[in-house]
Amino acid sequence: MALAHACVDAGIRAEVVSGGMPVPQLPEPAVRVHQLESVRSADLYFSAIVDFQGEPVTQQLQQRRSKQLLDIFHDLNPKVLVTELFPFGRRRFRFELLPLLEAAKTQGTSVVCSVRDSIQRRTGDREAETVQLLRDYYQSVLIHGVEDFLPFSESFGKAGEIDDLLHYTGLVDTGPGTIPDAIEEGEIIVSAGGGAAGNALYRCAVDSAALSCYPDVRWRILAGATPDPQALNDLRARAPRRVTIESNRPDFRALLGSCRLSVSQIGYNSAIDLLVSGAPALVVPFTGDGSETEQGARAARLHQQGRVVVLDESMLTPAALAKAVDDLLEGGPVRFKRQSCGGAKATAQYLKRWLAQ
C-alpha cells in the first residue's frame, strides 16, 4: 500500500488487487482495493496454498480467481501493471498471473515487477525461467533497495542478463509516524513482524529475560498483529514480572526510538524499522527449514557495517539469547544515525515518467 499511496500523492491513480487474507484496516479512500477470493500459505515454508478454511486450493477456485483478476484488469484498463515479486517468486500463482500477463501483452499494457532488494535464492534452471518470463512480458524491474548496500546479484545470479531492466528505487518505508528522541532508560523490544515465524523467538525471549544479568531492564515482547489468544496466555503465564507481552502496537516506531535494545528477525520491513529509528539491534535471521536465505543476506550486510549483532537461528536458545543481550547491555548499546528511506516516492516518480512517455 505504501507504493500505491505514493503514486496517489504523485498524481497517479492507483488501484490494488489483493489475493491474500483480508486485513482489517482503516478506510483507504484514495486507493481502491480489489479483494480476490482469499487464499493463504499452508505453512511457514509456502509448501502449498490453501483457502480461508485451510483446505487445498481446488482447480475450481483457481479458475474463479483467474477470472476475477482478468475481469478487474479489463474493467480498469491500466496503462501500467505492477506485479509484486513475480516472476522471482509466487510461482504457485502462475495459474492466474500468466493469463494476466498474456492479457496485458495483448492489450499493450506496460508491465513492471516490484521486488525487494534480496530474494530467495533459486537453482539455475529456475533463474533461467524467470529471465525468460521477464523478457517475454516485462519492461522494467524496480528493485526496492540500494545497489551499494545489497546488490540484487547477490540473491539472483542471472541479474547480469537483465541488467537493462533493473532500476534501484531505494528502500520503501511502510512505517507510520514520527520517532521521538531516545531516552536513556528504555526497554528491550522483541518483535518478529506479523507472522507465525516469530513464535520460537517469542518463547525464547520469555525464558531469556529470566536468565539475564540485568534484572532492572524491562522486556516488551510484541507477539504479532493477531496472536493466538492461547499462545499469548501461555507466554504470559511463564514470563517474569518485568516482561510485558502484547500484540503489535501502532506506536512501534516510537518504542524503537526509545528502546535500550531491539531483538528481532530481519525481514525487509524490520530492517527499515531499525534504519529509520536508529535502534541498537540484535537480530536472529529466519532460516525456516534451511532454505530461506533472504534475511541472512540482509543481516550479513548490516553486520559488516557494524549496524547489528547477529545470532544464528540454529544457535537460538534462552541461554544464548540472554548472553547476547547481556553482552550488548554491558557494552552500552550505541544508537545510530537515523536514515530516511524514500523508495516509495522514487518509485512513484519513476512510474510517472513512464506514463508520460
Image: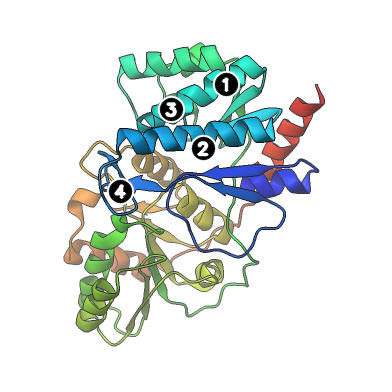
Give the CA separation, mark 4 to mark 1: 37 Å
User: Quick check: can you spot residue 148?
Assistant: no
**Type of the residue with mark 4:** Phe
Residue under the point 60% across and 65% down: 26
Residue under the point 36% across and 54% down: 265
Q: Quadrant of the C terminus?
A: top right
Give the side of residue 302 with respect to residue 206, left or right.
right
- 172 up-or-down from 199: above or below: above
Frontmost of labels 4 and 3 is 3
Residue that mark 2 sits on: 68
Find residue 302 and report its horizontal and vertical position in percent.
44, 45
**Type of the residue with mark 1:** Ala
Q: Given contact means CB atoms under 8 Å apart, are the residues at marks 4 and 1 in contact? A: no
Query: Helix, strand or loop at disc 2?
Result: helix
Residue that mark 3 sits on: 88
**Type of the residue with mark 2:** Gln
Give the side of residue 332 with respect to residue 50, left or right.
right
- 284 up-or-down from 46: above or below: below
Give the CA separation, mark 2 to mark 4: 34 Å
Give the CA separation, mark 3 to mark 2: 23 Å
The numbered mark, 4 or 3, whose residue comes first in the sequence reads: 3
Residue that mark 1 sits on: 103
Question: As rendered, which of 350 and 84 lies closer to the eye?
Answer: 84
